[in-house]
Image (cartoon, rainbow, N blue to C red):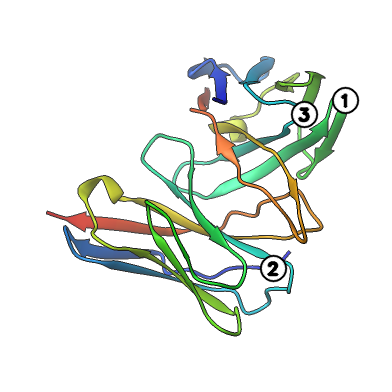
Amino acid sequence: SQTIHQWPATLVQPVGSPLSLECTVEGTSNPNLYWYRQAAGRGLQLLFYSVGIGQISSEVPQNLSASRPQDRQFILSSKKLLLSDSGFYLCAWSVTYRTTVITDTQYFGPGTRLTVL
Amino acid sequence: DAKTTQPNSMESNEEEPVHLPCNHSTISGTDYIHWYRQLPSQGPEYVIHGLTSNVNNRMASLAIAEDRKSSTLILHRATLRDAAVYYCILRGSGTYKYIFGTGTRLKVLA
């Protein structure tokens, strides 16, 4: 069966410090990978998605970046955190099924709660 | 990206059915309708999805209007564990993106 891991679970960082959040998926090959952020009391905002190694699409221009060094590894980074980067960061994976209409189902990790002080 | 509109919140009594509505008047012919729910402090989990026909699974039922401009997620017997934020999302075939709105916060009363 497939599983998705995120770490760390919680993180408290000062403004201006770097960030690295990691997500790994087990039990599937060539998944689509996603990073979302959820501010307190808000919906999910798609940050990045990747359909293959080294392929990253950015949805929101900001001080965050993403990388996919291996097929089932997705990393979210920042060189200098802002207060507005605080939130609940979620990684998700999916596998696209190509029938008459393309669709898939996303599976989310447990999330990382980031507080920037 | 096509948008969805959901009520901000709803309440239900335990053991009673719950009908969660979603309007998506700009849906295209190849957009799937997906429902996810998010329990407190957890990532969203998949509930159900459909294209044109009504769908049933162990968690819920999805009723899709004939013109596909609206849909309803049906929880047949609400339990306290069903208290969550429910998101209705359109998944287009030409994109890998899901666009989450603010969802409906369901409160289940004992």
Read off the residue under disc 3: A30
Pinpoint the chain carrying mark 1.
Answer: A
Question: Tag on residue A54?
Answer: 1
| Residue shown at 77% from the left, 29% from the top | A30
**Above or below for A56 versus A10:** below
Amino acid type of disc 3?
Asn
Q: Are marks 3 and 2 on the same chain?
A: no
**Residue furthest out toward the front:** A99
Q: Disc 2 marks which amino acid?
A: Ala
Q: Chain of mark 3?
A: A
Q: Secondary structure at mark 1?
A: loop
Residue A45 drawn at (x, y percent)? 62, 46
Q: Mark 2 = which residue?
A: B2
Q: Where is residue B104 shown, x and y percent of the image?
A: 41, 60
* Separation of residues labelled 2 and 1 (CA atoms): 29 Å
**Residue B42 in view of the camera:** yes
